[in-house]
Amino acid sequence: MQLNDKKLAKELYKKYSAIHRRKIRAWQMICVLSQFVDDDIVGEVTQCLQIALYRKNLPSVRQYLETFAINIYMEFPSLVMHRLKFI
Protein backbone atom coordinates (compact mmCIF):
# COMPACT_ATOMS: atom_id res chain seq x y z
CA MET A 1 0.00 0.00 0.00
CA GLN A 2 1.34 3.36 -0.89
CA LEU A 3 1.30 5.71 2.09
CA ASN A 4 0.48 8.76 0.00
CA ASP A 5 -2.41 7.29 -1.99
CA LYS A 6 -4.73 10.30 -2.46
CA LYS A 7 -7.92 8.45 -1.58
CA LEU A 8 -6.54 6.55 1.39
CA ALA A 9 -4.75 9.64 2.75
CA LYS A 10 -8.03 11.56 2.95
CA GLU A 11 -8.76 12.71 6.47
CA LEU A 12 -12.33 13.87 5.90
CA TYR A 13 -14.66 11.04 5.02
CA LYS A 14 -17.91 9.58 6.29
CA LYS A 15 -18.41 6.37 8.17
CA TYR A 16 -19.43 3.51 5.82
CA SER A 17 -18.36 5.48 2.73
CA ALA A 18 -16.27 3.78 0.03
CA ILE A 19 -13.09 5.44 1.36
CA HIS A 20 -13.91 4.32 4.90
CA ARG A 21 -14.39 0.72 3.76
CA ARG A 22 -11.14 0.81 1.74
CA LYS A 23 -9.21 2.14 4.72
CA ILE A 24 -10.59 -0.56 7.00
CA ARG A 25 -9.81 -3.32 4.50
CA ALA A 26 -6.30 -1.95 3.89
CA TRP A 27 -5.47 -1.80 7.60
CA GLN A 28 -6.98 -5.23 8.21
CA MET A 29 -4.70 -6.59 5.50
CA ILE A 30 -1.69 -4.78 6.96
CA CYS A 31 -2.45 -6.23 10.41
CA VAL A 32 -2.44 -9.74 8.96
CA LEU A 33 0.85 -9.04 7.17
CA SER A 34 2.50 -7.67 10.32
CA GLN A 35 3.82 -11.13 11.16
CA PHE A 36 6.07 -10.96 8.10
CA VAL A 37 7.90 -7.76 9.11
CA ASP A 38 11.54 -8.60 9.80
CA ASP A 39 14.70 -6.79 10.89
CA ASP A 40 15.49 -5.71 7.33
CA ILE A 41 12.37 -3.59 6.86
CA VAL A 42 11.20 -2.75 10.37
CA GLY A 43 12.82 0.72 10.28
CA GLU A 44 10.98 1.70 7.12
CA VAL A 45 7.74 0.19 8.44
CA THR A 46 7.89 2.16 11.69
CA GLN A 47 8.61 5.41 9.83
CA CYS A 48 5.51 4.88 7.70
CA LEU A 49 3.56 3.89 10.80
CA GLN A 50 4.46 7.14 12.56
CA ILE A 51 3.20 9.15 9.59
CA ALA A 52 -0.04 7.15 9.52
CA LEU A 53 -0.60 7.53 13.27
CA TYR A 54 -0.54 11.32 13.00
CA ARG A 55 -3.29 11.39 10.39
CA LYS A 56 -6.89 11.81 11.41
CA ASN A 57 -8.97 8.66 11.07
CA LEU A 58 -12.29 7.47 12.37
CA PRO A 59 -12.07 5.20 15.44
CA SER A 60 -13.03 2.12 13.41
CA VAL A 61 -9.97 2.66 11.19
CA ARG A 62 -7.71 3.83 13.99
CA GLN A 63 -8.24 0.61 15.96
CA TYR A 64 -6.55 -1.35 13.16
CA LEU A 65 -3.73 1.18 12.95
CA GLU A 66 -3.13 0.84 16.67
CA THR A 67 -3.40 -2.96 16.50
CA PHE A 68 -0.71 -2.97 13.83
CA ALA A 69 1.50 -0.69 15.95
CA ILE A 70 1.07 -2.99 18.96
CA ASN A 71 1.94 -6.05 16.86
CA ILE A 72 5.13 -4.38 15.60
CA TYR A 73 6.24 -3.09 18.99
CA MET A 74 5.52 -6.46 20.64
CA GLU A 75 7.67 -8.17 18.00
CA PHE A 76 10.46 -5.55 18.26
CA PRO A 77 10.42 -4.27 21.89
CA SER A 78 13.72 -2.44 21.48
CA LEU A 79 11.90 0.04 19.22
CA VAL A 80 9.67 1.09 22.10
CA MET A 81 12.58 2.56 24.06
CA HIS A 82 13.91 4.17 20.87
CA ARG A 83 10.55 5.92 20.26
CA LEU A 84 10.17 6.97 23.90
CA LYS A 85 13.41 8.93 23.70
CA PHE A 86 11.83 11.30 21.17
CA ILE A 87 8.75 12.12 23.24
Image (cartoon, helix red, strand yellow):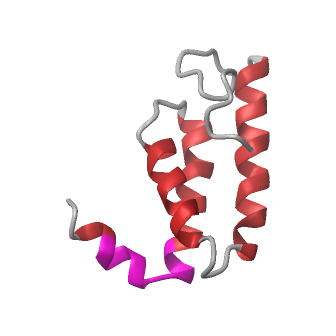
Magenta residues, start to end: 73-82
Q: Is residue 44 above or below residue 28?
A: below
Q: Is residue 24 above or below residue 73?
A: above
Residue in view at x 71 percent, y 60 percent:
31
Counting from the top left corner in percent of width and height, residue 62 is at 55, 42
Q: Residue 74 colored magenta? A: yes
Counting from the top left corner in percent of width and height, residue 10 is at 59, 21
Looking at the figure, which quarter contains the N terminus?
top right
Residue in view at x 62 percent, y 50 percent:
64
Position of 59 with respect to 41 (left or right) is left
Residue in view at x 53 percent, y 22 percent:
11
Q: Is residue 56 above or below residue 37?
A: above
Q: Is residue 16 above or below residue 36?
A: above
Q: Residue 11 colored magenta? A: no
Counting from the top left corner in percent of width and height, residue 7 is at 69, 21
Counting from the top left corner in percent of width and height, residue 17 is at 74, 17
Predominant SS along the magenta part: helix
Looking at the figure, which quarter contains the C terminus?
bottom left
Position of 17 with respect to 14 (left or right) is right
Q: How many numbered marks, from 0 up?
A: 0
Residue in front for this viewpoint, 83 or 27: 83
Residue in view at x 46 percent, y 34 percent:
55
